[in-house]
């Protein structure tokens, strides 16, 4: 007798198989020419059920140009999968292929991801510079990510500098506290 969890796994696997079969049939039989919305929907669907490799496969097989929503979706899934290098690669690819700058969401997703990954704070700093040059501003969430990244990398001096910049920007940051060993930052707005 199947347990409830193995039964639901089997159902899920069957549904995924059905989705892939349906997708393959549409492509093979030329039923509908897939467009960017079709691909983005497939990518988002796979991401929703944590099938990142499948989402990436659909992205790589696209026969039309991805749009900003497609890139943001794949960048977000790469972030969740803990692949900051690939997320940055897709962000740069977006700028090159689309001939436009990523939007705030694109930058925020990648920068916060880099700040949480070990050894990536300098790349995050570079992207913050790109973001500011593209006319975007840093919000309280991004400041928090950058402060966390510097603290986590052991650069308490830079963390404090960014923290002070956040306070001076007069953003509504509410209560903010970060502790690492003997180092502690706290701000109550």
Image: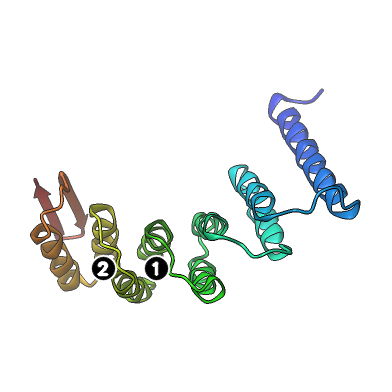
The answer to whether residue 133 is left or right of residue 73 is left
Which of the marked residues, 2 or 1, is nearer the chain's N terminus?
1
Expressed as whole percent of the image width and height from the top left, the position of residue 159 reads 19, 67
The answer to whether residue 4 is left or right of residue 95 is right
Examine the rendered structure and indicate whether residue 17 appears above or below residue 182. above
Residue drawn at point x = 15 percent, y = 44 percent: 175
Residue drawn at point x = 24 percent, y = 65 percent: 151
Residue drawn at point x = 69 percent, y = 63 percent: 64
Q: Which residue is mark 1?
A: 118
The answer to whether residue 103 is left or right of residue 133 is right
Examine the rendered structure and indicate whether residue 3 appears above or below residue 21. above
For mark 1, give the secondary structure. Answer: loop
For mark 2, give the secondary structure. Answer: helix
Q: Quadrant of the N terminus?
A: top right
Answer few, some or many: residues within 10 Å of disc 1's Cα (few below 14, many 20 plus, some between 14 and 19). Answer: few
Expressed as whole percent of the image width and height from the top left, the position of residue 135 reads 30, 68
């Amino acid at each position: 007798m199947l347990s409830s969890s193995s039964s639901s796994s089997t159902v899920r696997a069957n549904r995924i198989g059905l989705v892939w079969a349906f997708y393959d049939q549409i492509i093979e039989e030329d039923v509908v020419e897939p467009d960017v919305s079709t691909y983005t929907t497939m990518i988002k669907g796979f991401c929703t059920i944590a099938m990142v490799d499948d989402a990436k496969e659909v992205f790589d097989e696209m026969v039309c140009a991805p749009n900003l929503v497609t890139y943001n979706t794949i960048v977000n899934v790469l972030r969740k999968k803990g692949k900051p290098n690939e997320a940055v690669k897709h962000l740069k690819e977006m700028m090159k292929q689309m001939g436009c700058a990523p939007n705030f969401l694109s930058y925020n997703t990648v920068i916060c991801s880099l700040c949480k990954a070990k050894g990536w704070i300098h790349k995050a700093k570079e992207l913050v510079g790109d973001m500011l040059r593209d006319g975007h501003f840093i919000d309280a969430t991004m400041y928090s990510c950058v402060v966390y990244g510097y603290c986590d990398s052991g650069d308490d001096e830079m963390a404090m500098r960014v923290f002070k910049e956040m306070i001076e920007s007069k953003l509504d940051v509410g209560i903010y506290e970060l502790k690492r060993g003997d180092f502690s930052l706290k701000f109550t707005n």
